[in-house]
Image (tube, helix red, strand yellow):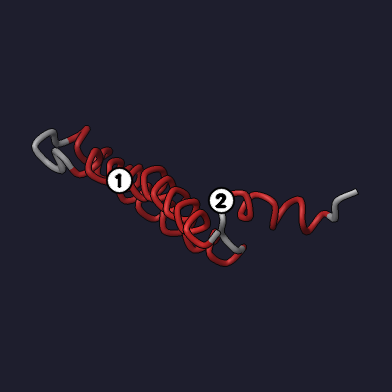
Amino acid sequence: MKSIWKKHFLDHPSSVDESYLEHMGQALYFSSRMIAGGLACFVHGIVPSAFVRTGSGIIGKLYDRMVLNRRRNRDSKSVNSVEQV
């Protein structure tokens, strides 16, 4: 049986190749950017000429950081491990 600590705090960060603290830092970064983007979209809803590209720009940067960079890092690790053999 898994310990509660491992199940709730270590399994998921490990599944994305991060330590607990690295994962916490990434999650806090993402949450702050999402809040900022949400506020920009809220203001844009009231004043359509304000923050015209801010929300979509933040989404694009977050997607790149979360999905594309993770793929690049995973692919470079597999290439490096093959080269070491």
| Viewer-closest of 27 and 52 | 27
Q: Which residue lies furthest to the right in this view?
A: 1
Q: Which amino acid does label 2 sit on?
A: Val
Circle 2: element type = loop
Image quarter where the C terminus lies is bottom right
**Dot 1 corresponds to which residue?**
37
Residue, x 13% and y 33% (percent of image)? 48
| Viewer-closest of 50 and 65 | 65
Query: Measured from the top left, where is residue 31 in percent x and y?
Result: 43, 52
Residue, x 47% and y 58% (percent of image)? 83
Q: Which amino acid does label 1 sit on?
A: Gly
**Which sits earlier in the primary sequence, circle 2 or circle 1?**
2
Q: In this view, does 15 lie to the left or right of 30?
A: right
Residue 16 badge: 2
Query: Measured from the top left, where is residue 55 in percent x and y?
Result: 25, 41
The quadrant in which residue 4 appears is bottom right
Residue, x 36% and y 44% (percent of image)? 68
